[in-house]
Image (tube, helix red, strand yellow):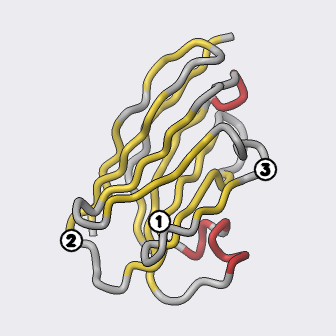
Amino acid sequence: VQLVESGGGLVQAGGSLRLSCASSGRPFSTYAMGWFRQAPGKEREFVSAIRWSDGNAYYADSVKGRFTISRDNAKNTVWLQMNSLKAEDTAVYSCASGYGYYYIYEFSIAARYNYWGQGTQVTVSS
């Protein structure tokens, strides 16, 4: 499985970006895809995740109401629409996919995911 992110860049505070993550060779049993981010000097943190089968979405409190995750099963692609961006959203954003069954709390755990993309930089200027 290979994950390739795109869509990062530089944007002013209050602006929007749309990240995409294309999955090639997706195993039939993919259960979840998620977005995580890591800012310089900080630990990686959960942003959002989606259950592949029914599209149920999960969000970190810090992005709830501003970010929206969606997927296209036919294209094996997941998107992260990011609106009302803030300087504190600046980070490298990485997508990940995982298989097997997830309890709800597991969607936000990075170690629960099996495959990772290379990451895309998002920089929000204030």
Instruction: For marks 1 and 2, give the CA distance.
Output: 14 Å
- In this view, which residue lies farthest toward the front? 54
Upstream in sequence: badge 1 or badge 3 = 1
For the N terminus, the image quarter is bottom left
Q: Is residue 121 above or below residue 79?
A: above
- CB of mark 1 within 8 Å of CB of mark 3? no
Q: Residues within 10 Å of mark 3 (few under 14, many from 20)?
A: few
Q: Is residue 14 above or below residue 68?
A: above
| Mark 2: amino acid | Gly
- CB of mark 3 within 8 Å of CB of mark 2? no
Give the side of residue 103 with respect to residue 31, left or right.
right
Nearer to us of marks 3 and 2 is 3
Image coords of residue 100 (percent x, y) = 48, 88
Residue at 58% x, 52% y: name it.
36
| Mark 3: amino acid | Asp
Q: Residues within 10 Å of mark 1 (few under 14, many from 20)?
A: many
Q: Residues within 10 Å of mark 2 (few under 14, many from 20)?
A: few
Give the side of residue 101 with respect to residue 19, left or right.
right
Q: Nearer the viewer, residue 5 or 62?
A: 62
**Residue at mark 1:** 33
**Residue at mark 3:** 61
Q: Nearer the viewer, residue 35 or 39?
A: 35
| Mark 1: amino acid | Met
User: Helix, strand, or loop for circle 3?
Assistant: loop
User: Helix, strand, or loop for circle 1?
Assistant: strand
